[in-house]
Amino acid sequence: MFHTIKKICIVFLVLATCCLVGCGGQKKNLSHIEEDDGIIVGFSQIGAESAWRTCNTRSVQDAAAAQGVQLVYDNAEQKQENQIKALRSFIAYQVDVIVFVPIVTDGWDNVLQEARDAGIPVLVTDRKIHVDDQSLYAGFIGTDSLREGRNAGLFVLNKFKNKSELLNETKEYINIVELFGTEGSSVAIGRAEGFREVLKSHPQYRIIYSKSGDFLRSKGYELAVEFLDMYDDIDVIYSHNDGMTLGVIEAMEERGLRPGKDIVIITIDAQQAAIDALREGKVNCVIECNPKTGPEIIKLAQKLAAGEPIPRLQYVHEEVFYETDDLSLIEPRGY
């Protein structure tokens, strides 16, 4: 009976939201609530800015459907205030579990306290958060952005290892351009920190340009136009995601430059487009950021709804693809 009352309330939430934004609008896409005894999960996604993000959302939706879990989905459109409103809506309508991808690291203490006061466990996924009281959320599942950054740094060192002694003698440098993602997001912070951690004891490697491209292809293109105008001695481009990388490749080719040959390119995500670019020699290293975390997320949500403990920190499996690999063995990515 209590679940039925909750589902009636959530139906009203769906209808009210559709009235506010239009049922055909892009802001919200709340799933239909069925009359059964399955648990209800509120899922707040940051947006739909890339093929990676769309795949991540679809993975959660498909896993929920397969397990008979009722999913209330919200697209925050890259705005933290939208996401906080969504979390408060989930709390008001008494979902069993809240799952969310935080846009940025900070600013979640108050709304997570409200969730705890309501007795609703919270699972953080994809991006990490910083809160004063770690018990405000049950756990995190996602990718290890620090490790991704380290893998990028290790590839750079290996790529230029034959030049290291020469660089020490000539006092020259390997000049690196970095395009990072959303400012204040844990993935941007982790990928930057991991990269620098590997290179910090190698002073001949220097980052000459580092700016946010917000994980967008259009921004990657804009920034590439800018740094290609500023510098003619770039050795490496380290891009925090494939979308920005594809924008960089486009800008380079417009200038008659050869991506992957004139400038070494490292990218993160491993979308199909990036793997294709790796096969074409336009990218030198692709670091996977696995978006297909839906089954694990729903499994953890079910445990939380049942009052069972979950791991505090759970990383998903990821691979690194190099230009020297047998690229014919890479299976279609599906995103």
Image (tube, rainbow, N blue to C red):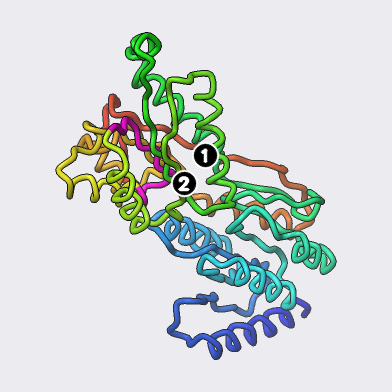
Left/right placement of residue 221 relative to residue 34 reads left
Magenta stretch contains residue 252: no
Above/below status of 193 relative to 159: below
The secondary element bearing badge 2 is classed as strand
Left/right placement of residue 177 relative to residue 19 reads left
The amino acid at mark 2 is Phe
The front one of 83 and 60 is 83
The secondary element bearing badge 1 is classed as helix
Residues at marks 2 and 1, CA–CA distance in whole angstroms: 8 Å
**Residue 117 position in % (x across, y down):** 85, 66
Above/below status of 165 relative to 133: above
**Residue 232 position in % (x across, y down):** 26, 36
Residue for point 72% across, 78% down? 93
Which numbered tag is attached to residue 191? 1
Above/below status of 68 relative to 268: below
Tally of numbered discs: 2
Left/right placement of residue 116 relative to residue 49 reads right
Tell me the residue that label 2 is attached to. Answer: 180
Q: Residues within 10 Å of mark 1 (few under 14, many from 20)?
A: many
**Residue 208 position in % (x across, y down):** 42, 35
Q: Earlier in the sequence, mark 2 or mark 1?
A: 2
Residue for point 28% across, 24% down? 324
Is residue 90 in view? yes
Residue for point 35% across, 51% down? 223
**Residue 34 position in % (x across, y down):** 59, 78
The front one of 273 and 56 is 273
| In this rendering, the label closer to the viewer, 2 or 1 | 2
Q: Are marks 2 and 1 in contact (CB under 8 Å)?
A: yes
Q: What range of the chain is rendered magenta?
A: 233-244
Magenta stretch contains residue 240: yes
Is residue 246 in view? no
Q: Residues within 10 Å of mark 2 (few under 14, many from 20)?
A: many
